[in-house]
Each structure stands twice: as structure tokens, then as C-alpha cells.
Image (cartoon, grey):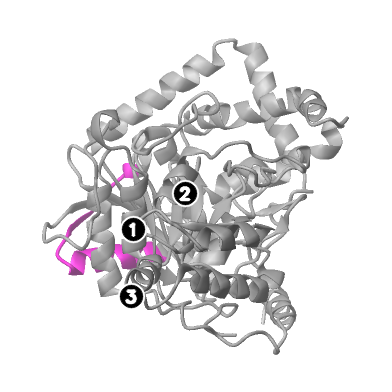
Amino acid sequence: MKRRKFLAGASAVALSSAIKPAAAAMDEFYAYDAMGQAALVRSGQVSSSELVEAAIKRIEKLNPVLNAVVHKLYDDGRAVAQGPLPDGPFKGVPYLIKDLADLEDAPLTFGSKLFEHNVADFDVGSVVRAKSAGLVIIGKTNTPEFGFVSTTEGRLLGAARNPFNTAYHTGGSSGGAGAAVASGMVPFAHASDGGGSIRIPASVNGLVGLKPTRQRLYVNTPPLGAADIGVRLAVSRSVRDTAQILNVAEKKGASADYKPTGFVDGPSKKRLKIAFHTKTFEGREPHPDVKRATERAAKMCENLGHNVEATDAAMIVDGNFLDQFMNVWSSSAYELVKNARLIGLMQGRWVDPEEVLEPFTHGLAKLYGGRKAKDPDLDAKAQAYVRSVEADYRAFFEDYDIILSPVLFSPPLLIGTQDGHKSYEDVYASVVEYVAYTAQYNASGNPAISLPLFTSRDGLPIGTQFAAAHGGEATLLHLAYELEEARPWRSHWPEISEKNL
């Protein structure tokens, strides 16, 4: 056995033993998806309070090992569960919010020591819609500092661990959400995606993760940074939960930029034209396990009657993409570092930016600051580039229904690879290699989904990414239902889960 695998296995055994045998017996609700739990409430078979108490017990049992939930809001959830609750499609179902999102009167740390004592004073749009759907919020989930990296192992909140093998990461930046759902703490959880942060944790935790079209969703805050690249939705265990939360979260009526998707409830008979690729936009082939999983997914689609063509779809973006995307990605880091002392004073404390912000945040800020000093029009050019990428993808999707590709360059990374204490240079090199297939769709604004079809040779989940034309979420969901039927994944539970402990 290789040293890497031995150490990973030893770590998993040691951490799993931390769950005491005396923990509460497995409850009867963990295997229901969110719509299944809501159906139990609607039929009167169970109360919201019973679901909430069961979820709290699961969190208390599993979280000491996984570190998925970082702020417990149990009493608030209990009070809400007693009703009255909005009569939404998820009425009475327990839910978790990512700690990058404002939830009124709850901690909002952004995973950073700079905001360690911060409390939100309003509900962000995705939280507003979650509450209106009847969801009962019982906690907030782990995230790296400001969601800047592709794993979740920041200095403030610590590492979230993968329930399939706790030596590995849970994805970033919605890593806590991924671990919570994969292990069965809650049926699905809030997540956000500015460069892959819904699809990455979905990929490494064996979940469904949809990044919707830019401007598809209801928002009540302006976009951050030099371009509008981020969205908020969820990670889930079932396609129907993802379809329903999209229905809840999307804009409707006069405010809608796209025809509303509504609730997509199953597969379609329409056969699709699928452009398939495994190479990155830099022309590199991924890890053999990822390449094999992606090719198997392509073959699976072909066997289902879809027209799958090997293409150079990765080359829709040019060699300029990484630099331009980093100009967008790093702008908020620059503002945070520049204003760190003022932010501290607004909280009534004196802070040293070098102490409260991680090396990667400082490195991003330095990257942006240096480029901005040389080119005052940097932001305008980045926005123009994003618009050009959007136009290029619109043109490509005139000929294809779907692009099929990997989500990540390799199987899940060991914890420590992108640790919050590591140098900017080390983390940057890891991030840009690892996240080679997701940020394009944040720049272009296209919808994209990660589906848990296959695993690595070591049994770790490897997601497959499917992208569609702008406004094409229904196409993705129809296909996702079909693949879910062809290769069911909901019964595939990790070692550290309510099912197996």
C-alpha cells in the first residue's frame, strides 16, 4: 500500500472512532429527501418539530468528526418549527445556511477572523426564499475564508472532512454543506457558486449540485466584484429537491430575465446533442480516474440514445481566460485587505490585517493591486471579457444542447493541500490546476450541474458536469432525472453517515 493511501486510511479510522457507540440509534427520517420529509409533514405523519429534533441529533452525532456545521441555531429552529410555517413545498424541513450568506441575527463570519464576531442584520435573497418555502433553519455551514479556495479548511472554522474518507476535503466553498448532506445530517443545504462552489462539493461528496443561469434567481443585494459571477442555490441528494429549490428561488413574473423553469418533475423523451470533452482549456488531460469517469458518463448518455460528439468545447475560452477571471476573482480580496482596519473599527476592535486575513487572501489582493496599478481600466476590461465569454457560449449552444465534461481535474484532494495557513503560491498553484472546468460557466453565466455518477479507484466520488444554454435549467434537470434513474445514487452512503454508524 502506498504511503499516501495508508495515511489516508489511518486518518479515517482514527476519526471515525471518535463517534461514540453510545450515540443515538439511527432515526427513520435520514433517508428521505427534502420533498419526502415535506410530504410526511403535509400528511400529518410527522411534525416539523420531530424532523428538526431528529436532524439536531444527527448533527450532534456526526459533526464532531466532519466539522460541517459551525454555528448551531437549534433553539431558533425549534421555535420556528412550532409554527405557523409558510405553506411552501418544503414546509417543516430542517435546513442549513452557508456561512457566506446573511441570515438575520445569526453569525456571519465569511470563514474569516476579520469577521469572527460579525452578526447579520438582514436575510439575503436566497434565505428569504428558503424561509418562504417553509424550510426551518437550524444552523450555518463551514466555508473557507470568503469562499476563495476550492477546499474548506480555513484558519477560523477549521477543516470540514469528507464523510467518504475523512482524510480528504469536502470541496469549497460550500464544503460544510456538502459534508452535512452527504452524511445525512439534513436532506439538502444552502450553497453558493462563484467559481464552482456548488458543483465542487457536489462532485467530491457524491451529491447533485446545480449552478443556475446568471440573473435567473431572486436577489436583494447587488453583485460583488468586477462582474456578476456568483449564484446561490443548494446541494442535494436528489434531482427533485434541486428542481424544487430552483422553482422556489427563481424570479417569476415581470422581474424574470428568463422564462421561469417551474418545477421540472421528471425526464424528457427528447434526445440531446451533447458535446463531450475531457481536456482543460489549457489542453491538459485530467487525472486518469477523472478521464475514465467522464468517458463512462459520455458512453452512458450515448446508450440512452443521446447524440454524443467528442469536441474541443474546452477551447471556447481562450488563453486569456485565467488572467481575466482572476482579475474578477481577486478584486474583492483587494478591497477586504485595503479596508481591513476600518472593518475592524466598525466592529469596535483594532485588527492587524496580517493576523486576521489568510495568506491566500493577501496574495489575491496583491495580485489585483499590482495589475490595477498598471492598468486603471482593469475592471472594465474584465467585465468586457466576461461579456465576450457569454457571447461565445451563446454561439456554441446554437449547435449543441449540452456540454459534458469533468467537474475537477483530479479526485478529491487530501486535507492540507489548500490549508488556510499555507503560502499564497502553494494554494494558487493547487486551485488553478484543480478547478479547471467550472469557472468558465461563472464567467459565461450558463447553467451547469454536477451529478454523482462514478467514483475513483479508491471509492471517492467523482462528479460529471453538464452545462446547457442560458436559461436551459430544464434541459439539465430532465437529463439529470434520466441519469438518476439509469444509475441511482441515493442509496450510496459514505462511511461517516447516519446510514453506516
Q: Is residue 118 above or below residue 24?
A: above
Between disc 2 and disc 1, whose residue precedes?
1
Q: Which residue is mark 1?
A: 89
Residue 167, percent from left and from top: 68, 70
Q: Hey, what amino acid is under mark 1?
A: Pro
Q: From which residue to which does the magenta span run?
A: 292-313
Between disc 3 and disc 2, whose residue precedes?
2
Q: Nearer the viewer, mark 1 or mark 3?
A: 1
State yes or no: residue 447 in magenta. Answer: no
Q: Nearer the viewer, residue 122 or 80?
A: 80
Q: Which residue is mark 2?
A: 284
Classed neighbour count for the residue bearing mark 1: other residues with Cα under 10 Å, few (<14), some (14–19), many (≥20): many
Q: Quadrant of the C terminus?
A: bottom right
Residue 271 tag number: none
Q: Is residue 483 visible?
A: yes
Q: Which residue is mark 3?
A: 488
